[in-house]
Image (cartoon, rainbow, N blue to C red):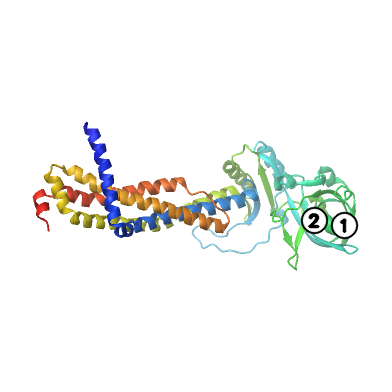
Amino acid sequence: MTEKGELIMGIIENIKLAINSLFANKMRSVLTMLGIIIGIGSVIAIVTVGDSLASSITSEMSGVGARNIHLGLEQKDFGTEDEEVVYEYYEIQEKDYITNDMIDDYKEMFKKDISAISLVEDVGSNKLTNGKNKAEVSIKGINKDYFNVEKINILQGRFINDDDIVNTRYVAVVSDKFVDKYFGGKFTYEEVLGQSFEITLENNIIRIYISGVYEYVKNDGEVSFNSNGEELTNLFIPISTAKKISKKPEGYMNATILPSTEADIDSLLLNTNQFFGSFYNRNSKVTAMAYSMESMMKSVNKMLDSVKLAISGVAAISLLVGGIGVMNIMMVSITERTKEIGIRKALGARGKVILLQFIIEAVIICLIGGIIGILTGMGLGTIITTILGKAVKPNVQAIFYAVTFSMAIGVFFGYYPASKAAKMNPIDALRYE
């Protein structure tokens, strides 16, 4: 038989010896593995729960337009780097607003990266009565891009367009929920088009004609509540109409930008901040800032990864304890089998064969403990993530590292006692009592 064949046969024989030794001392073997099981199980459970939280956060943020860029005005800090920053409240003035010219220039400069820009003006809420039927709405002035940015589904009729903005007849898009409440089910969504109702704003009674009906979606990011905590649906009118009837100044305090599908979000976000920031360099009070949910998601995921790593590191301390337990039990095992080692060496067994025998035994202990720990961690992770409502598959990479690490522990902590056994003098071993 070749040397390679002898080595393979020796490894197989040593694996059998290791398994027999484990079964001969079942309780001792289980207690030895306990630290490995707890350590690896904890790490896998923590990583699985962390992945579940990250997936849940990503899913929630994606649902409210993760790629959208939100632009808004913010108050600047006062003071210098050498001075303590003093915060004084400053109410943003009309002269500080983002203008239509700024937005038009921005659209032109980055037209390849932008699909739409949503503008909104909150007007207030109104309680409408139609005989016995009542409905309360939150009135929002919007531009034509709003529906694309917010992905609102029109059930009947049409979106608000540029003709509505210059037309003297006031039109609105209302929700299906509003139609059902206000008209009491008397009209279909098609029949309600062209119907009108009155709202009161700034002590003025204004007649509104319905041009479209949209599908109301609960928790769509645009939900408002009245003083009684009742949920309101939105009534959309052209933003120019909103500013006219509410006597709001021209310009905007915020906007939402929908990037094109091929746009690089990080690059567009940087360009957006630089473009709008340039208009506020000489403004000592206010600046324009842009951010995106996607960039926030990346920051949150990085933070979760750091937390997972830190907690996993603490949990992995039990692996060190488990490794010391393996070394301890291997020392005991070698002491108990001193005569056996002496006989094997007297019969011609080389030191490296003895070394390999006990290293393999240590690796087997850690490997079995690692497998039990993996199954335990997967089970715990699945239970916890199911309770959290966002079950995810166990992290394959974490399982691979767990198995590799458990084997490495076996080699590392098994080497010293194995080396001690391999260096034994056969005569002294045979005389050992």
Few, some or many residues within 10 Å of mark 2 (<14, 14–19, 20+): some
**Image quadrant in which the N terminus is located:** top left
Q: Residues within 10 Å of mark 1 (few under 14, many from 20)?
A: some
Image location (x, y in percent) of residue 258: 67, 44
**Amino acid, disc 1:** Phe
Instruction: Report x, y in % for residue 399.
Output: 42, 48
Is the residue under label 1 in contact with that under label 2 (CB below 8 Å)? no
How many numbered marks have been drawn onto this rendered protein structure? 2
Report the residue at 24% width, 40% height from top. 10
Along the line of sight, the residue nearer the viewer: 120 or 155:
155
The x and y percentages for residue 209 are 88, 51
Nearer to the camera, 410 or 257: 410
- Can residue 303 be seen? no
Task: Say whether residue 72 is left or right of residue 412.
Answer: right
Give the labeled residue for mark 2: 177
Answer whether residue 5 is visible to the viewer in this image: yes
Drawn side of residue 369 relative to residue 378, left or right: left
User: Mark 1 sits on what residue?
Assistant: 183
Which element is circle 1 on?
loop
- Three-letter code for the amino acid on which mark 2 is drawn: Lys
Q: Name the one closer to the observer, 355 or 280.
A: 355
